[in-house]
Amino acid sequence: MSQVDSLIQKKLEKASTELVTPPLLGASVTELTTWVQQQGQPAYRGKQLHEWIYQKKVRSLADISVFPKQWRAEVEEIPIGRSTLHYRSVARDGTVKYLLQLADNQIIETVGIPTFEGGGNSKPRLTVCVSTQVGCPMACDFCATGKGGYKRNLARHEIVDQVLTVEEDFQQRVSHVVFMGMGEPLLNIDNVLGSIRSLNQDVGIGQRSLTVSTVGIRDRIREFAENRLQVTLAVSLHAPNQALREQLIPSARSYPIKDLLTECREYVEMTGRRVSFEYILLAGVNDLPEHALELAQHLRGFQSHVNLIPYNPIQEADYKRPSGDRINSFMKILKQQRIAVSVRYSRGLEADAACGQLRRGIRD
């Protein structure tokens, strides 16, 4: 374990090394070992429990066959923390959207995205887009999740469960996780940090394969940087100036774009990691040549990368996706200004699983 990982783990386990409160999913092998000892079991059962939760993906302690029958009967009602599959939708490109029902009957969405990179019979890279809240309080004007309101933060186990659910369904290991589903991750920073630790150390996904997306919460990017993680930070900018950003993102009124970019520069200095800027292109709104030039002025000399995302339509908004020519023109201007840029076409569009299309709700 690296020094960085050790510091993070000590911080996250400070209040839980003496007592682990179920659900058990999201707990480290150290925490699980402490827990089984509290139940009067030998320490080695902690490692067994860890294996059955994260590798065998057991859903009930009663199903762990290596445990004594009598003890299994005593603890079978203690929750591991797995969700229930409520609805599953598959897009033509292989993207799968899941509606997961939580213990309190709330519904969240997560998306499994296979990307075929090699030839022959090679398995695709598998990315999971996880949610961090039930709904979202940010109310971005172009986003379906924000239209549905906000209920609560997700717990650590509820975030990790989404990845295990996709691994079970696809019958392969997840290679990448993006915190870009429902919710604002930095408003749930403690549970997000806890899930990052668990996904890295328990599930076995490298930190550089994790991306955390935020619309920008004052001082939270700095707080996130203090953990010195090797994850990718993606900031949802979506506008090159304060007036337009306020129009699209109501929360921007209390966090000027100048202050946001200053905090992003501090993040680069503190972590040595570049920032990715997400920019959804809305036809006739933020996709004009003057917008590209204004964006370039902000980012010139910045250790960053811009992801242009053509708008994905939702029923609740009247925005349109720009033409291919307009998209290419915007990208060309940024490249001429020496801004690192690429276009990201979202997967799962017709299944409402693309960026900005996730909405909280129950389907029949």
Image (tube, helix red, strand yellow):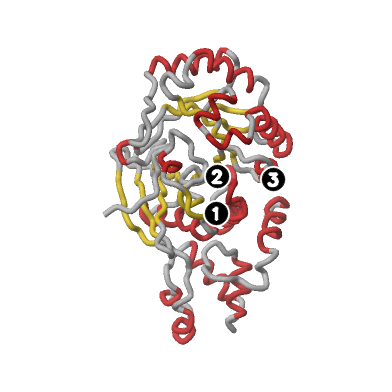
Q: Nearer the viewer, residue 283 or 29?
A: 283
On the image, which quarter does residue 264 sit in?
Answer: top right
Disc 1: CA contacts within 10 A as few (<14), some (14-19) or many (>=20): many
Tag 3: amino acid: Glu
On the image, which quarter does residue 312 sit in?
Answer: top left
Q: Position of residue 51 (x, y in %)?
A: 51, 66
User: Which residue corresponds to mark 1?
Assistant: 199
Judging from the image, what secondary structure is the residue with disc 2 in? strand
User: Which residue corresponds to mark 3?
Assistant: 223
Identify the mark nearer the N-term, 3 or 1.
Answer: 1
Residue 251 appears left or right of 300 = left
Identify the mark nearer the N-term, 2 or 1.
Answer: 1
Nearer the viewer's eye, disc 3 or disc 2?
3
Alpha-carbon span between mark 3 and mark 1: 20 Å
At 56% across and 30% down in the image, what residue appears?
Answer: 277
Up the image or down, 4 lies above or below 233; here it is below
Q: Position of residue 248 (x, y in %)?
A: 50, 30
Q: Are marks 3 and 2 in contact (CB under 8 Å)?
A: no
At 70% across and 56% down in the image, what residue appears?
Answer: 6
At 39% across and 59% down in the image, what residue appears?
Answer: 101
Dot label at residue 174:
none
Residue 304 appears left or right of 343 = right
Tag 1: amino acid: Leu
User: How many numbered marks, from 0 up?
Assistant: 3
Alpha-carbon span between mark 3 and mark 2: 18 Å
Dot label at residue 210:
2
Looking at the figure, which quarter contains the C terminus?
bottom left
